[in-house]
């Protein structure tokens, strides 16, 4: 079926939104074959984002792990993460639809900042929904969005995190759909969002593949990325899905440990269900109520995951692992000391998996990490975490 | 009741109610209540009280992420979940309430999916449920599930929105059963001080596409608004306004509120 990844995906939304999704799908399907659209998109990625992003070596991390490590530096993008690749693409679509009001949900705030930035650049109105818990632990990004001219709406319902911010954004969209485009920040939501966001993020993997080949003349042995909703992972994996000898690994947040029940390891511990418009793996109880997700990192604490990841898991094309809060915090510090890079706390989960997997590769092999974002915004939060006895 | 003589045994309980209403030239009152709100005991009493005034009852099965609902029904949902309400306990509540009005289960897909679609259709039919309305299963979203409901004793109730285009409207109502639920305005559920502009036009548009009865909901809050809606529609859904009264003033007040709506609908 259209808009499905195997059985996953679909369009489970209130009737009011179906017409807007039909319009968006029609436009996007037309635009996919429109060279002019992609030329404009790539020109903006150069001009606004500073793409292509660098491919860096990580010699001291590599020495620790016992292999070659390469970093795809999405942290060096304008706004400090991969999120802006998608925000620019969708803002271009909104402009083509004549919609001048943009809404977005945000967890850690990176997608909100990226969307606010693009709206400022394009002169669009911007409203960002953010859970109250995240507003408190990501104060810097809240202020950054406000500086960029966006209205940040704190969401006080439910778990007061990304899940509920997404509910509230969807409620806004149902109410204002004729004038408003909803820039979903990850490869989640109803069709066409998961494939559209994937396409906009695939620039990461397409660039990285060419850069790795140029540097060493051969493909990496393993590609690693963190997975919350899963957009940076899908973006880098997209460059390598056809390379069957390349191992792909997605790393979720195990929070306080999967056995504790306080985690966000949807693909490791969830089962298929419907949330936010699509069928995918989901953290839920026996009655189908969605369970609160936990992670030390705002942005990974989402109880769902993109439907394409669910399919890649079932097909065993991608291996999914989980890393807990303590190991992620340790990797955050390790990366700073070894490489002089403060990674986003989300990305630190993928780094922790690499250090945990030391011995898996020999010195001649190459591991490519999607360094999805910079960690400046996480520094104050991490400082508090490291002082608290756990 | 001339037309009801022609009613064949397989006709649904909902069809029989709407036929009888048409016969009597009376507008149908469709109250919505969230199962398990405000407490399991008061929920039972509120359903029984509403049954006195209702033609069809919508019973909401709480879901953790009610993204089609406004603040009032969200809050009732979270209270109901905190009270331990489940799909199974909702069916039990419906059985115990011994309601005269046919019941439509109103919920989201995931609780139903996890319960199991065939199992739900069987258990709900045993509990006397007449219809199923899933707010996040628009027409065509999942033909497999839709087909199972359509082939079951339960009617598949479909929602139609102001944004539903002509072509889609025709396809959607073609597979609808029981009645068509017309969303009066853009947005989530919730009381509103004014009715949508050109509601009469919206109803006429749906009327041209189907012979099924049309119930209108979202934002109908007062007896006066209900009466205005009933000039054009076959039925009026009262949800958030009722849940609000029940939550703040209790079962007796909710019954008085519905009685006032009923009186407005029945006034000559």
Image (cartoon, coloured by chain):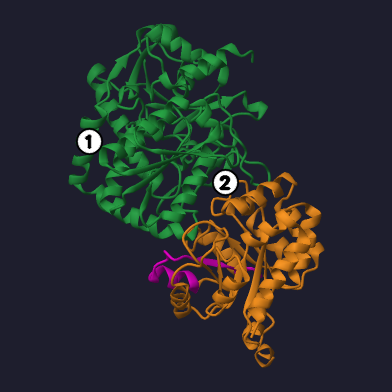
Chain colours: A green, B orange
Instruction: Find numbered disc 1 in the image and state the secondary structure of the residue it sits on.
Output: helix
Residue A41: x %, y % from top left: 23, 39
In front: label 2 or label 1: 1
Q: Quadrant of the N terminus of chain B?
A: bottom right
Q: Quadrant of the C terminus of chain B?
A: bottom right
The region drawn magenta spans B151-174
Chain identifier of the residue bearing label 2 in the image:
A
- Identify residue for label 2: A273
- Residue at the spot x=68%, y=75% of the render? B262
Q: Is residue A10 above or below residue B168?
A: above
CA gap, disc 2 and disc 1: 37 Å
Q: Can residue A48 be seen from the camera position used here?
A: yes
Q: Can residue A267 be seen from the camera position used here?
A: no
A178 left or right of A275 in image: left
**Label placed on residue B177:** none
- Residue at the spot x=38%, y=6% of the render? A60
Residue B235: x %, y % from top left: 60, 75
- Identify residue for label 1: A44
Q: Is residue A259 above or below residue B15?
A: above
Q: Residue B162 in magenta?
A: yes
Is B130 in front, or is B186? B186
How busy is the neighbourhood of tag 2: few (under 14 within 10 Å), some, or many (20 plus)?
many
Q: Is residue B171 above or below residue A332?
A: below
Instruction: Find numbered disc 2 in the image and state the secondary structure of the residue it sits on.
Output: strand
Chain identifier of the residue bearing label 1 in the image:
A
- Residue at the spot x=26%, y=37% of the render? A121
How busy is the neighbourhood of tag 1: few (under 14 within 10 Å), some, or many (20 plus)?
some
Residue B242: x %, y % from top left: 67, 62
């Amino acid at each position: 079926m259209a808009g499905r990844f195997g059985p996953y995906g679909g369009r489970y939304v209130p009737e009011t939104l179906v017409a807007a999704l039909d319009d968006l799908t029609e436009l996007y399907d037309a635009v996919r074959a429109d060279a002019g659209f992609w030329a404009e998109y790539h020109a903006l990625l150069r001009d606004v984002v500073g793409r292509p992003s660098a491919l860096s070596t990580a010699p001291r991390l590599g020495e620790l792990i016992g292999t070659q490590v390469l970093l795809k530096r999405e942290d060096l993008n304008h706004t400090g993460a991969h999120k802006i690749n998608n925000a620019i693409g969708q803002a271009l679509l909104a402009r083509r639809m004549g919609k001048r009001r943009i809404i977005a949900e945000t967890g850690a705030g990176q997608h909100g900042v990226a969307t606010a930035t693009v709206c400022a650049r394009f002169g669009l109105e911007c409203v960002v929904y953010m859970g109250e818990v995240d507003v408190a632990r990501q104060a810097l990004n809240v202020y950054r969005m406000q500086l960029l001219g966006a209205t940040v709406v704190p969401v006080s319902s439910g778990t007061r995190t990304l899940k509920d911010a997404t509910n509230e954004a969807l409620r806004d969209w149902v109410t204002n759909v004729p004038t408003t485009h909803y820039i979903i920040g990850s490869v989640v939501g109803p069709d066409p969002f998961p494939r559209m966001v994937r396409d906009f993020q695939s620039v990461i993997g397409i660039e990285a593949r060419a850069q790795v080949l140029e540097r060493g003349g051969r493909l990496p042995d393993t590609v690693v990325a963190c997975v919350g909703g899963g957009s940076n992972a899908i973006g880098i994996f997209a460059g390598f899905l056809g390379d069957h000898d390349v191992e792909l690994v997605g790393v979720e947040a195990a929070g306080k440990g999967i056995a504790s029940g306080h985690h966000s390891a949807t693909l490791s511990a969830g089962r298929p269900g419907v949330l936010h418009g699509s069928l995918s793996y989901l953290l839920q109880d026996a009655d189908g109520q969605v369970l609160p997700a936990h992670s030390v990192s705002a942005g990974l604490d989402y109880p769902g995951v993109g439907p394409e990841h669910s399919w890649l898991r079932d097909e065993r094309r991608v291996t999914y692992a989980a890393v807990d809060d303590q190991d992620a915090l340790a990797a955050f510090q390790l990366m700073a000391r070894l490489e002089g890079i403060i990674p986003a706390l989300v990305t630190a989960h993928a780094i922790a998996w690499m250090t945990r997997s030391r011995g898996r590769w020999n010195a001649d092999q190459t591991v490519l990490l999607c360094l999805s974002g910079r960690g400046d915004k996480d520094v104050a939060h991490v400082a508090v975490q490291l002082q608290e006895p756990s | 009741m001339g037309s009801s003589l022609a009613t064949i045994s397989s006709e649904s309980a909902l069809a029989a109610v709407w036929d009888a209403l048409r016969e009597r030239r009376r507008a149908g009152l469709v109250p919505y209540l969230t199962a398990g709100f405000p407490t399991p005991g008061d929920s039972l009493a509120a359903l029984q009280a509403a049954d006195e005034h209702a033609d069809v009852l919508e019973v909401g099965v709480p879901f953790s992420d009610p993204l089609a609902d406004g603040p009032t029904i969200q809050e009732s949902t979270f209270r109901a979940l905190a009270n331990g309400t489940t799909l199974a306990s909702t069916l039990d509540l419906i059985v115990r309430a011994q309601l005269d009005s046919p019941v439509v289960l109103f919920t989201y897909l995931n609780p139903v999916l996890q319960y199991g679609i065939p199992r739900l259709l069987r258990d709900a039919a045993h509990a006397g449920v007449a219809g199923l309305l899933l707010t996040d299963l628009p027409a065509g979203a999942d033909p497999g599930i839709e087909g199972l409901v359509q082939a079951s004793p339960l009617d598949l109730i479909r929602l139609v929105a102001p944004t539903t285009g002509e072509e889609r409207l025709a396809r959607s109502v073609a597979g609808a059963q029981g009645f068509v639920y017309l969303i009066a305005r853009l947005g989530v559920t919730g009381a509103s001080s004014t009715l949508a502009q050109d509601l009469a036009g919206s109803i006429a548009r749906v009327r041209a596409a189907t012979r099924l009865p049309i119930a209108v909901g979202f934002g109908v809050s007062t007896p006066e608004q209900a009466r205005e809606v009933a000039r054009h529609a076959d039925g009026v859904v009262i949800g958030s306004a009722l849940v609000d009264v029940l939550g703040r003033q209790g079962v007796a007040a909710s019954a008085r509120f519905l009685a006032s709506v009923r009186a407005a609908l029945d006034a000559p």
